[in-house]
Amino acid sequence: MSNTAYNLKDPRIVRQIGLNALLNSLGPVGMANFLRQFDTGTGDYTKERDTLNGNQTVDEIYDEILVMRKHQ
């Protein structure tokens, strides 16, 4: 299957080619098991992150991790 024969900018075509590749490589059961590993998730990661971390900088979070590791 040559990529030049397909419009790889069309997500529907890319998805179909990908699913066919999984099916051919893994078989139906393997393909299903592979696809079950992925989840788009729910919620708003940015809002949740801001709620958890507040206005902390990356350096402040890193320092907290180091302190927690010392106490383990």
Image (cartoon, rainbow, N blue to C red):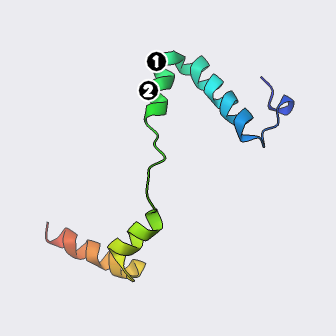
Reading the image, the residue beneath label 1 is 29
Residue most toward the left?
71
- The answer to whether residue 68 is left or right of residue 34 is left
Reading the image, the residue beneath label 2 is 33
Report which quarter residue 36 is drawn in: top left
Q: CA distance from mark 2 to mark 1?
A: 6 Å
Q: Is residue 48 above or below residue 18?
A: below
Residue type highlighted by circle 1: Val
- The answer to whether residue 9 is left or right of residue 42 is right
Instruction: Point out residue 12 in the picture as x, y percentages from the top left corner.
Output: 71, 36
Q: Secondary structure at mark 1?
A: helix
Residue type highlighted by circle 2: Asn
Mark 2, residues whose alpha carbon is within 10 Å: few (<14), some, or many (≥20)? Answer: few
Instruction: Point out residue 42 in the picture as x, y percentages from the top left corner.
Output: 44, 52
Total of numbered circles in the picture?
2
Depth check, front residue: 46 or 62: 46
Instruction: Point out residue 48 in the picture as x, y percentages from the top left corner.
Output: 39, 67
Cβ atoms under marks 2 and 1 closer than 8 Å = yes
Depth check, front residue: 63 or 13: 13
Residue most toward the front?
43
> What residue sits 41% from the left and 77% below the top?
58
> What residue sits 44% from the left and 49% below the top?
41
> What residue sits 46% from the left and 40% below the top?
38
Q: Secondary structure at mark 2?
A: helix
Quadrant of the image for the N terminus?
top right
Indicate which disc residue 57 carries.
none
Residue most toward the right?
5
Instruction: Point out residue 2 in the picture as x, y percentages from the top left corner.
Output: 81, 26
Report which quarter residue 55 is drawn in: bottom left
> What residue sits 36% from the left and 73% below the top?
51
